[in-house]
Amino acid sequence: MTDLVVRRLLVDMEQPIARHWCAGDAFRTALFNALSMSFPVGEQFFIDSVRNGFKALPADRQEQFQAEVQGFVGQEATHRRLHALYNGHLDKLGLVNDWAPRAQKRLKKMEGLDARHWLGITAANEHFTAIFADFMLHNADLLGDQDERLKTLWLWHSAEESEHKSTAFDLYQALGGSHAWRVKWMRTVTAFFLVDTLRQTVNNLHRDGTLWKWSTWKSGWGYLFGKRGLVTLTYKPWKEYFRRDFHPNQQDSTASVRWLQEHGDKFVPVGQAVPA
Ligand SMILES: [Fe+2]
Ligand SMILES: [Fe+2]
């Protein structure tokens, strides 16, 4: 079991966001903004999946998961709330979130399905989030220094995603979810995730007026496929998920532990007073 601390982040999300807050880079800004747009709907689905999965457990196993489920829900609910504020600023910049309504419509089809399907989807998404989070923590410089507040938000979110990466997976296993369905959902989630991310990133660039600039795609190519690229470095850990004996804890999360240790001034564990 994982001890999950819910933390209140000490950042002011009321202040507006600059058009190219991420190192002045149009592509990276559009990509991160796209991901942020997906979080309030996505994370609510993860919360619901984990809650439903917990309820479906026999009473004697619920006790084992209780604290972790509570921590998971608390962490995701906090992410949701801050990303909703973040997304409010994106609306003001003229960006339009097409991803959230599309995802909402798709997730409606899940109503009435077995809790294991919800968890299969959530575990696949959480694997994506965890490997992306680890990449972010190892390449924090790529977030730039122009907006310390957003840099902190992304790294705190990454650290917590890494922390709770096993919760949905363990519940799926505890409910007897099969390997065949686990990898089937990963294939489906991967296809939707990549297409949705690309569509919303292009949409953001289009509204930003930077879609047809050579510099946008030159930077995008480097960020995704360069030596230190997102796709280059996350392909191998992504593929691990298809192994029959895979468990999220087999993947390194020391970057998350380190970030949380070194940035204790950036958050307050819920239930504790803000330091003077
Ligand atoms: Fe999250
Ligand atoms: Fe998560």
Image (spheres, helix red, strand yellow):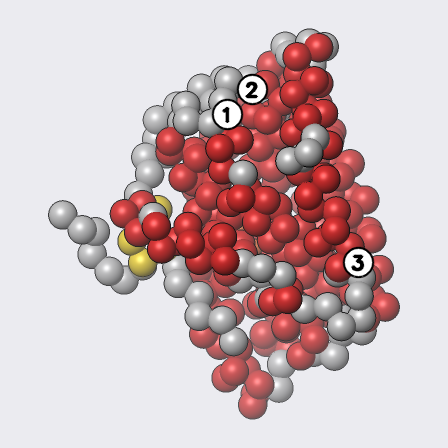
Which element carries disc 2, helix, strand or loop? loop
User: Looking at the image, which residue sits at the far front?
Assistant: 227
The CB of the residue at mark 2 lies under 8 Å from ligand 1: no
As displayed, is residue 207 above or below residue 53? above
In the image shown, does 225 or 57 lie closer to the viewer?
Answer: 225
As displayed, is residue 113 above or below residue 212? below
Which element carries disc 1, helix, strand or loop? loop
Q: Earlier in the sequence, mark 1 or mark 3?
A: 1
Label 1 is placed on what type of residue? Cys
Label 3 is placed on what type of residue? Trp
Mark 1 or 3: the one toward you: 1
The CA distance from mark 1 to mark 3 is 32 Å
The CA distance from mark 2 to mark 1 is 6 Å
The answer to whether the residue labelled 3 contacts the one labelled 2, judged by CB atoms less than 8 Å apart, is: no
Name the residue at 35% across, 26% down.
Answer: 15
Q: Earlier in the sequence, mark 3 or mark 2?
A: 2
Residue 254, position in %: x, y? Answer: 50, 58
The answer to whether the residue labelled 2 contacts the one labelled 1, judged by CB atoms less than 8 Å apart, is: yes
Residue 62, position in %: x, y? Answer: 54, 82
Q: Quadrant of residue 242?
A: bottom right
In the image shown, does 218 or 44 lie closer to the viewer?
Answer: 218
Q: Which residue is mark 3?
A: 185
**In the rendered picture of this protein, how many numbered marks are placed on residues?**
3
| Res 22 label | 1
In the image shown, does 123 or 56 lie closer to the viewer?
Answer: 123
Q: Which residue is mark 2?
A: 25
User: Looking at the image, which residue sits at the far left?
Assistant: 276
Mark 3 or 2: the one toward you: 2
Q: Is residue 198 left or right of residue 28?
A: right
Name the residue at 60% across, 67% down.
Answer: 249
